[in-house]
Amino acid sequence: MMIRRWIKVFITLFIVLILLSSGLSACISFRFAEETPTFRWRTSTPTPDPALSKWQISQPQENKLLDIWGITENDVYAVGAEGTIVHYDGQKWQSLYSGTTEPLFGIWGTSADNIYAVGNRGTMLHYNGTAWSTINVNTEDPLFDIWGSGPSDIYVPVFGDDTMLHYDG
C-alpha cells in the first residue's frame, strides 16, 4: 500500500515537471481543501518603469569604466581600464591623459582642482585642475578605493597587505 502511494506521488510530480518544462505553466492552481487558498504561479514580462526611461546610455570611450565621481552634474569624472580617465562637462565626455596604462579602480576628490584616482600596482594619481600627476605611495599592491572627509583626511585601503593609507595633510 505504501509503495503504491509513493508511485502515485512520483507520477504526479513527474507530470507537473513535464508541464512546467513545456511552457504550459502560465497559470497553475492547486486546491488542497475547501478552506485552503489557491496558489498561482504566473510568468509575466515586467512593465517598464517610467522613472528609468530618463536614463540614457553614454559611451565616452571604448575602455571599461570602473568608478565615477562628480562635483556637480556638469563636472563628472570616471576612471577605468588601461589608465582611462574621462571628464563630463554637462555636454560631452572628454578623455584626459592619465600618464598610466594601469587599470584605475577608484576616484574621489574635494574640488575641481583636488581629485585623486587609484588603481592597480599601487597607482595613485592627483589632478590639480590642469593635469594628472603620479603620487608615490611605496606599494605595488592594488588600490581599489579612495575616500576622505576633506582635503587633509583621505583614506585608501591597500588590498595585498591589509593596511590603510591615510593622508593627513
Image (tube, grey):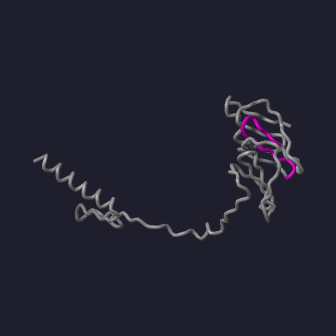
Q: Position of residue 157 (x, y in %)?
A: 71, 36
* In the rendered image, the vertical position of residue 74 relative to residue 148, given as above or below: below
Q: Quadrant of residue 159?
A: top right
Q: Residue at x 78, y 54 (%)?
A: 86
Q: Nearer the viewer, residue 70 or 143?
A: 143
Residue 100 screen position, x and y as percent: 79, 42
- Residue 154 percent coordinates (x, y): 78, 40
Q: Residue at x 20, y 54 (%)?
A: 11
Locate residue 15: give its quadrant. Answer: bottom left
Quadrant where the C terminus is found in the figure: top right
Answer left or right for 127 relative to 55: right
Q: Which residues are magenta?
A: 112-125
Q: How many labels, in total?
A: 0
Residue at 78% of width from left, 60% of height from top?
A: 93
**Looking at this rendering, what residue extends furthest in the left direction?**
1
State left or right for residue 50 relative to residue 144.
left
Residue 44 covered by magenta stretch: no
Up/down of 139 relative to 127, above or below: above
- Residue 117 in picture, x, y percent from top left: 77, 44
Q: Is residue 87 visible?
A: yes
Q: Is residue 71 visible?
A: no
